[in-house]
Structure formats: structure tokens, C-alpha cells
Image (cartoon, coloured by chain):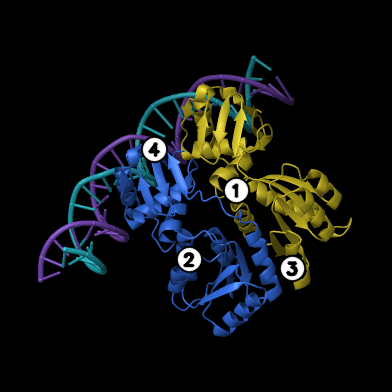
Chain colours: A blue, B yellow, C cyan, D purple
Amino acid sequence: MRVLIVEDDDSVASALADALRATGHDVDRVDSGVDALLRHHDREVVLLDLGLRDGDGFEVLRKLRQVSRAPVLVVTARSDERSTVRALHLGADDYLVKPIRLRELLARIDAVTRRQPTASPPDDVVATHGLLIDLAARTVTGADDTPISLTAKEFALLAVLARRVGTAVSRQQILDEVWGDAFAAASRSFDVHLTQVRAKLPVPELITTIRGFGYRLEA
Amino acid sequence: MRVLIVEDDDSVASALADALRATGHDVDRVDSGVDALLRHHDREVVLLDLGLRDGDGFEVLRKLRQVSRAPVLVVTARSDERSTVRALHLGADDYLVKPIRLRELLARIDAVTRRQPTASPPDDVVATHGLLIDLAARTVTGADDTPISLTAKEFALLAVLARRVGTAVSRQQILDEVWGDAFAAASRSFDVHLTQVRAKLPVPELITTIRGFGYRLEA
DNA sequence: CCTCGACGATGAGGACACGCATCCGGCGAT
DNA sequence: ATCGCCGGATGCGTGTCCTCATCGTCGAGG
């Protein structure tokens, strides 16, 4: 199993790396959030420390989730329920509080990875009403393969909806996933971007407004 | 989500059941290992207490795994690493130590089940007398697929009843779930919205008034 | 039959959510 | 240095929805 350790305490990272290598895993180590985002490719599991020096761990988690579907086990010193719930909601698969018990960690990595749809059906492609959204390639094409070019934020916004085609997504949920919670819910920026996305779609009504709740990409 | 709680401490089981029901889950309770093996059918998640009176919890877990692929979250008082590792190796998907923090439990259930690609068929859809209520998509359709558009409050109200089709729901319960507990029970806003919902339904009598208690959505 | 409490219906008004035009600062490319 | 694009912020218009107040109805019990 190819594991990525994101941890800036060297002694902890070494201990983890050794234990993992001893059990036959292939380990890659980084000590910052930005590196995590750069090096996550081809990794099958991520161990993420929330207490990184170079920024908010939750932010790293959120961004990681936008680009990778690999299981993430959060490993942190923060034991409060708030942080736990927040991390899990942001897409973490497990949450372990330091000090880490190595055998447990290994068992949990097992537990999390054995659930993975081995050779996952890469349905990173969402198709609906002639609209084609390829989440992996980050491309969107309309009918008769006309390419639609979206900006980063626009794509992120559409991607959140696309991952849950046919089901309603709350406004807050989108805000969290696209902007992170350090964002004023009162801001109208969100609406502006949504307007843009709709304008670029061949069929604007594909994104349905659910007043008082959020939005839905029609299936 | 259809949850099975295997727990022989009644107070704990009740607390869990209430919390889960309040968040829209369908809960089934048993208090012994043998019952767990009998009643696991059609359940999508299992919460398993290891400290059952009628036998070894690990045995229950092992046998459960032989007959069901549903995610299992172990909930127990045993905090030692040995037990944790053993449970996870036996196929548990998560392992929580009592006392349980409810919000965390809910988040972990989410985390574990969102990985499941197979939990699709029962898509939170309630159907009764030609009425179709899709709680995930937040859509309601009558006979011959005529869409019925409800406002946020109206939908919330109907959803509370829909989650418990065929069973009576007290007025107070609905108030709590739709408005939150900081709401005057004397307010008639509730009745107004109920009227609206009924007016929009093809068959108003689908919502039966139980005078002096509450309401019921007919099955 | 009368009363009383619980529920049903309706209209008005203020609040609110959403869509959108517009401005501004930042940043990379030509 | 300049231009164009992107993302965030702001303000307003508009339509909708929530609530309240009011009155009507219904059922149960004395």
C-alpha cells in the first residue's frame, strides 16, 4: 500500500514511517500542507496531521478532497469532538488522536482500505442531459462535444454538485467544500459564481435552485 | 439509513436510537448477539456493543461478517489496543470507546457509509398512495409524475412525517424537528404550513389529524 | 345545546433569499 | 508597463416565503 505521511514532527513521522515500512507499505513523507497537495499522486492512503505549521490542517484536508479520493486518516493531537466531526465531514475516513498506538493505526489503515472498491470503477465522469463532467480530467463538455471552459472556482462549484448528481446539496455544504468555512456565509460571491456557471452551461436550468436550502444538478 | 443497534444497556441504546432517529435514520434495536445475527437483514449499518451478556462480542462480529457486508461500527467500553486491533481485523469498520460522543458517532457513520457504493437502491424515497417523496433530491411528485413544489418549511414538515410513514408523530415532535426547540409551542405558524402542504398534495387526506396528539402520513 | 379547547383557513406585511450588474484589487501573460 | 482574466466584495431589485392576526369549524363533555 502506498502511503503518504503528512506530518511535521520528525520523530513522529519517522516512527510512523518505520512501522509502516516494516509491514510492507511504501511510504512517502512530506511535512507541509502544500507538499501534501503536490505529492498525493499515486498514493493510496494519506495520514494527515492537522497541526501543521504552514497553515490550517482542515484547509489542507478540504483541498486534498477536491483532487483525490484516496482515504485520509487524520492523525492529530486535538481530541475535541468539534474538530473530529469537522474533519470527518470534510471527508476524512478516520480520526486518530495522538499519542498514536501503532498497531491500532495499522489496523485502521487496513479497515479503511479494504472498503475501497478495489480497482474502483472510475465514475469520475458524470453525464447528465448531454453534459459531460470529467472530474479527473477537469473537463466539461456540452452536447456534440463542445468544450466548456470553466475557471477554477467555477469548476469546483460544479464539481460539488456533480459528485451528487440528482441529490440536493445545501448552500452551506457547497460553501464549505469550495471556499472552506472561513467564508462569510452572507457574501454574495457565491451567487455570482453560480451565475457564471449557469451562463456557460448549454442548459442553465440543469442547476435547480432549492430556495431556502441549496441547489441540485439534475440527473 | 437503516441502522441496527446491538446493545444490551437500555439507556445507552435509547440514547443512540433517539439521536439517530432525530437525524432521519431508521433504527432497529436488539440486545443480544443471536438477535443481531437474526435481524441484520436489510440493515445498512450495524452498531455493535462488544460487551454483551450473551456471549463473546468478537464472535458475534466474526459471524456477522460471514453473512453481511454491511459496515459495522463497534461501540464498547473496552479501550485497550488489543481489543481495538482485534475488532478491526475481524472486519469492523470503526471502533468507538464509550462514553460515546453522539455527534462524532453520527459523523463516523457518515464517513463509513459514504464509501459504500452499494447502498443505492433505497434512496431515501418514500412512496405512498401515488405520492413520491425523495428526501435526498428534495423532490415530491404526485401521480403521473406531476411535480409538486414545496417551500423549505413545507418540505421539512412533510419530510418529518415521511420518515415515519404510517406512524403517528406528535405535534411537539414536528415542531422540534422543523423549527428547533426555541419555538413557542403556541404559535400557529405550524398549522398554516400544514394547510399549505395539504393544499398542494393531490390527496389532502393523506395527512391524518390525530386530535390532541399530532399527525400521521398514511402508508 | 352550550362551552371550550384544538384545529383549519385566509389575507396582509415585513423579512429574507436569491440573481445580477458593477466595481476593485491581484496576478500572470503578452 | 499594460492588458485581460479571475475572484471577491457590495448594493439593489425582485419575488417568495414565513409569521401573525383573525375568524371559522369541528369534536368532546357537561
Does label 3 or label 1 sit earlier along the sequence? 3
Residue at image location 60% in from the left, 78% down from the top:
A17
Find out whether the residues at labels 2 and 3 contact each other: C-beta distance under 8 Å. Answer: no
Which image quarter holds the N terminus of chain B?
top right
Label 3: few (<14), some (14–19) or many (≥20) C-alpha neighbours in 10 Å: many
> Label 4 crowding class (10 Å Cα cut-off): few <14, some 14-19, many 20+?
few
Q: Position of residue B196 (x, y in %)?
A: 49, 30
Residue at the location (54% across, 59% down)?
A91
Q: Is residue B219 above or below residue B80?
A: above
Q: Which mark is residue B117?
A: 1
Question: Label 3 is placed on what type of residue?
Answer: Val
| Distance CA(mark 2)–CA(mark 1) | 23 Å
Q: Are marks 3 and 1 in contact (CB under 8 Å)?
A: no
The residue wearing badge 4 is A130
How far apart, in angstroms, are the residues tagged by discs 4 and 1?
24 Å
Q: Is residue B195 left or right of residue A15?
A: left
Reading the image, the residue beneath label 3 is: B85
Q: CA distance from mark 3 to mark 1?
A: 25 Å
Task: Identify the mark at residue A41; answer none if there is no mark.
Answer: 2
Dot 4 and dot 3 within a common chain: no
Q: Position of residue C17 (x, y in %)?
A: 39, 46
Of pointers 4 and 2, the one earlier in the residue sequence:
2
Q: Amino acid at mark 1?
A: Pro
Say what secondary structure mark 1 lies in.
loop
Q: Is residue B182 left or right of residue B100?
A: left
- Can you give x and y, in whole percent of width and height, for residue A76 in the image? 58, 73
Q: SS of the residue at dot 4?
A: loop
Q: Nearer the viewer, residue A19 or B142?
A: A19
Residue A206 lies, in percent from the top left, at 39, 39
